[in-house]
């Protein structure tokens, strides 16, 4: 499957993407994960992105498009891909359409995961993420805690709060979403690609997506 997952921070895009990879081997491509690895490894990209990310701002479109142009041409995308956190702005969405045309790739759909704001705030303050860049497993101390507190079940690294999970950064990320990313819902609706799912249960979201394929 070739799809875009849209939704506010904490809507569950990463969680749903990980469930969908088990469905048909499509690969999850999270620009947030790619950027966090770059920050952890202190690469040129990471140094450029860190300040924006910690403050809850979007990283400049040009940096993101450079990453995605390369990533979408890697061979593991042949089976399918789940774009998690990309595109995030109208210019990114327009550039993605051009890139997919150039690569002769057809999108199946853009899925909006619609979750109430109070649920999102609760989830983001209780999320824990594996700090190992090759793993980045997602936990939640309320709904899905690691077996041993603070330790990733999968790889044994620390499961920690992300740098952008302060109340201030979360509020800013939600405002940025409403201003810059929410307009993509109309953008994809206008192209006949939008599927909107209002659900807080990730399995329900996965079923709604697989039923549409
Ligand atoms: P990114 O990593 O993409 O963060 P985000 O969009 O803010 O999304 P999150 O990862 O916070 O949430 P999610 O929807 O994936 O939810 P999750 O599944 O983890 O981006 C981070 C930063 O990178 C951005 O702020 C920006 O600076 C930069 N960036 C990235 N992409 C960019 C782009 N394209 N352009 C410019 N800048 C970019 O779930 C959240 C929590 O809820 C977890 O604890 C999970 O366990 C729990 N949970 C999930 N589903 C359920 C459920 N059904 N029931 C109970 N708990 C649940």
Image (cartoon, helix red, strand yellow):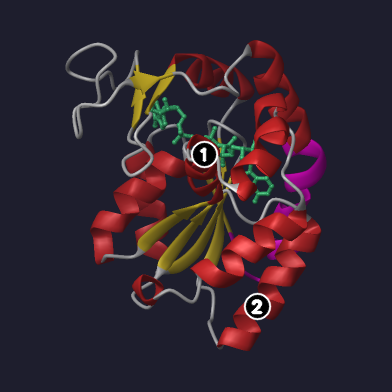
Q: Quadrant of the C terminus?
A: bottom left
Give the residue number, with chain letter if any, for mark 2. 99
Say whether residue 53 is left or right of residue 33: right
Q: Is label 1's Cβ within 8 Å of ligand 1? A: yes
The magenta stretch spans residue 133: no
What secondary structure is found at the residue carrying circle 2?
helix
Give the image quarter of residue 126.
Answer: top left
- Residue at 44% over, 42% down: 14
Quarter holding the N terminus is bottom left
Circle number at residue 55: none
Majority secondary structure in the magenta region: helix
**Secondary structure under badge 1?**
helix
Q: Residues within 10 Å of mark 1 (few under 14, many from 20)?
A: many
The structure residue drawn at horizontal position 33% and vertical position 54%, both measured from the top left corner, is: 20
Closer-to-camera residue (4/139):
139
Magenta residues? 177-194
Sooner in the amino-acid sequence: mark 2 or mark 1: 1
Q: Nearer the viewer, residue 90 or 195?
A: 90
- Left/right placement of residue 73 relative to residue 183 reads left
Residue 53, percent from left and from top:
66, 33
Q: Is residue 61 above or below residue 203?
A: below
Side of 185 relative to 76 (left or right) = right
**Residue under circle 1?**
36
């Amino acid at each position: 499957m070739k799809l875009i997952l849209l939704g506010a921070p904490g809507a569950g895009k990463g969680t749903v993407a990980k469930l969908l990879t088990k469905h048909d081997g499509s690969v999850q491509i999270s620009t947030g994960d790619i950027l966090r690895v770059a920050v952890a490894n202190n690469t040129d990209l990471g140094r450029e992105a860190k300040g924006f990310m910690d403050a809850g701002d979007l990283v400049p479109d040009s940096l993101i498009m450079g990453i995605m142009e390369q990533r979408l041409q890697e061979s593991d995308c042949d089976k399918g891909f789940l774009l998690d956190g990309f595109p995030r702005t109208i210019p990114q969405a327009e550039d993605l359409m051009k890139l997919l045309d150039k690569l002769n790739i057809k999108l199946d759909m853009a899925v909006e995961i619609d979750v109430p704001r109070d649920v999102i705030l609760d989830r983001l303050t209780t999320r824990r993420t594996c700090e190992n860049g090759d793993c980045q497993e997602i936990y939640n101390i309320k709904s899905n805690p690691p077996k041993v507190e603070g330790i990733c079940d999968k790889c044994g690294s620390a499961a920690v709060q992300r740098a952008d999970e302060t109340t201030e950064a979360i509020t800013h990320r939600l405002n940025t979403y409403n201003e810059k990313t929410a307009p993509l819902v109309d953008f994809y609706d206008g192209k006949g690609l939008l599927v909107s799912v209002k659900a807080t249960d990730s399995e329900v979201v996965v079923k709604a997506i697989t039923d549409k394929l």
